[in-house]
Amino acid sequence: MNSLSILEPATDEACCAPAGTPALGAEEAKQKALVFKALADPNRLRLLSIVKGADGGESCVCDLTEPLDLGQPTVSHHLRILADAGLLHREKRGTWAYYSLVPGALDQTAALLASL
Amino acid sequence: MNSLSILEPATDEACCAPAGTPALGAEEAKQKALVFKALADPNRLRLLSIVKGADGGESCVCDLTEPLDLGQPTVSHHLRILADAGLLHREKRGTWAYYSLVPGALDQTAALLASL
DNA sequence: CCCCGACATTGACAATCATCAATATAAAGC
DNA sequence: GCTTTATATTGATGATTGTCAATGTCGGGG
């Protein structure tokens, strides 16, 4: 299972939450921290910002390496982390890989904060 | 200047934002990443959760070390990071240090995501 | 079939981080 | 003033992370 489950509608424990919220379990905290870990880097925040504001809501890697002044492997690495966290969606068309914001992912992450 | 300025009402550039949002500057991204760095640890998320749900909205360090199963210096270290990020407020009363959520800090952090 | 362009993966390295043990500080009580 | 108690700071160590160079993969011409 990858870490993006924390950003998906809760399939289990959708109802019958234990009681209010008993602090925050160790395992649950670990999952939520994965999403914030993905956001805890300046270059990744800039990537999200660029992709969000891009024409058509998507960007290919080749358009992202220059504005960040980073090597292509590094950008690929950051994009992977964001995708693994469930924040970005990857679609390969031809030789290019297009990354776009997962709809509602940022909102769900924001909701994570409110439900602490 | 400490990092919590990103969570305070913007004193400069309160008006006259350059243009929509031109992606996200390197410096601005660095500041915002500091807040998410503070959230990017399971134990710190649990600390926030415990403090938020605590009676009176505050907890002293001695009440936090046991539920996390961490040493006292480590808990102190995490609390400092959360306080430096502008998420927690520290108040010393007698020998004890009481930590409480900075009002609105979590909401402002959530707003940070929406304004990417 | 071979080459080229776009992207991903691997390996290495420096930097940062989480944790603990030991020590320092500081307030309270005797 | 000393002892105790609660918290902070320092130093050390193992783990994680961000970055790049080198290499691998895969699709699209020629």
Image (cartoon, coloured by chain):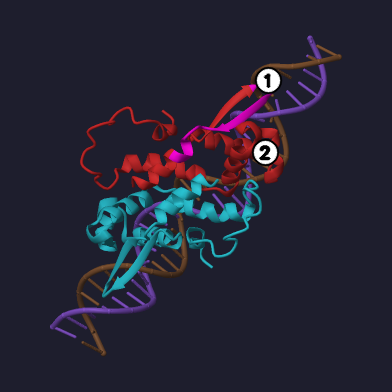
Chain colours: A red, B cyan, C purple, D brown
The answer to whether B93 appears left or right of A113 in the picture is left
Task: Please state the horizontal and vertical placement of residue B22, each as a whole percent of the image.
Answer: 65, 47
From the image, which quarter does the N terminus of chain B lie in? bottom right
The chain letter under disc 1 is A
User: Do circles 1 and 2 both sit on a common chain?
Assistant: yes
Q: What residue type is labelled 1?
A: Gly
Gap between marks 1 and 2, in whole Å? 18 Å
Label 2 packing within 10 angstroms: few (<14), some (14-19), many (20+) = many
Nearer to the camera, B23 or C18 = B23
Label 1 packing within 10 angstroms: few (<14), some (14-19), many (20+) = few
Earlier in the chain: of badge 1 and badge 2, it is: 2
Nearer to the camera, B3 or B60 = B3
Q: Picture quarter containing residue B83?
A: bottom left
Task: Please state the horizontal and vertical placement of residue A78, each as a whole percent of the image.
Answer: 58, 39
SS category of the residue bearing label 1: loop
Q: Which amino acid does label 2 sit on?
A: Leu
Q: Picture quarter containing residue A5?
A: top left
SS category of the residue bearing label 2: loop
The answer to whether A91 appears left or right of A70 in the picture is left
Nearer to the camera, B105 or C30 = B105
Question: Is-magenta flag for residue B96?
Answer: no
Q: What stretch is highlighted in magenta?
A: A93-107
Residue on which disc 1 sits:
A94
Task: Please state the horizontal and vertical placement of residue C13, each as a whole percent of the image.
Answer: 63, 48
Residue at 27%, 48% (x, y): give it. Answer: A23
Nearer to the camera, A90 or B76 = A90
Task: Please state the horizontal and vertical placement of residue B15, each as a whole percent of the image.
Answer: 59, 59
The chain letter under disc 2 is A
Residue on which disc 2 sits:
A64
Residue at 24%, 61% (x, y): give it. Answer: B56
Question: Is-magenta flag for residue A97?
Answer: yes
